Amino acid sequence: MRLVKAGIILLVMFIGSNCCSAVSAAAPETGVTPESVIILWTDGPRLKAVNLTFFPDNNGPLGIVSVPVYTCLPASEDALTLQEFYRRYGREKLIAQLENLFGSSIMAYITIDQRTLCHLSRVIGSINMAGRETNLLDVFEGNYTDSPINLQEEIRLLAGAMLTPRVIVKLPEMIWIFSTQVDSNVTPRHLLAFYHMLRCRGPDVLQKKAVPGNDYVIGNRKYRYVAPGTWSKTLREVAS
């Protein structure tokens, strides 16, 4: 079957009284890192964004970690960036690298290409972000505002925008796009469970943070170097 900023699909996805239990394993024991779903936004062979969504237990929060694609992977040959590593080795090996860094298994994947994102954006139409009318594509591209973006505030605003009646009535078409145009091992039933959880608990159940590090520009390229313990620390911060 087929299917950011965690954004998009965490919205089309945040679609049970079982809530998170439909997509995650049983609540982990204390001290055990929760499993996660990786969301990859691509443009053909080029990786544009990587987000991981962690599910500590059925009560939330839903923790989202954004990993900039210019982040260097310390365990990789020549300290390749995520974007370079994906282009050279593909999704499965990138997932294995991230599992090692976060100390967490990644139970599922969602890869959404630029063309599908554009299609979803057209179907959803106008959305309101903090009083500004925009669309899903511009939110993903960061073109909807000139102000600095707070990732957690942005994902909660986007989640709220996706819960409005004019978007909810388009849910069947969004599920169809997910099922036919997106590369994923997540099922529509799982998406509906996400969506139900978001509706039950509201956007505040979402916690999002980018993996912090030191940014450098070498030539005309940007790199982020992340200290070894920072990966798992960031996971704990969003998932607790």
Image (cartoon, grey):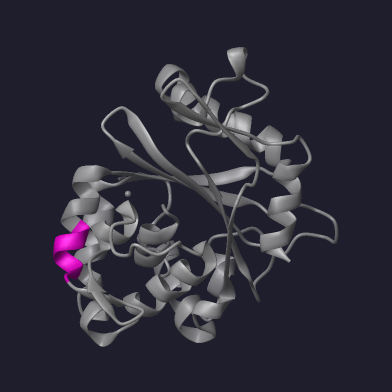
- Is the N terminus in the top left, top right, bottom left or bottom right quadrant? top left
**Image quadrant where residue 12 sits:** bottom left
Q: Which residue is more in the foreground, 120 or 57?
A: 120
* Residue 26 appears in the rendering: no
- Name above or below for residue 134 compared with residue 24: below
Secondary structure mainly formed by the magenta segment: helix
* Residue 190 appears in the rendering: yes
**Image quadrant where residue 24 sits:** bottom right
Q: Which residue is more in the foreground, 228 or 199?
A: 228
Residue 182 in the figure: left or right of residue 59: left
Q: Residue furthest top?
A: 78
- Residue 52 place in picture, x, y as percent: 54, 50
Q: Which residues are magenta?
A: 120-125
- Name above or below for residue 15 compared with residue 66: below
Residue 176 in the figure: left or right of residue 230: left
- Residue 171 place in picture, x, y as percent: 25, 72
Q: Residue at x 73, y 66 (%)?
A: 240
Q: Residue at x 44, y 68 (%)?
A: 154
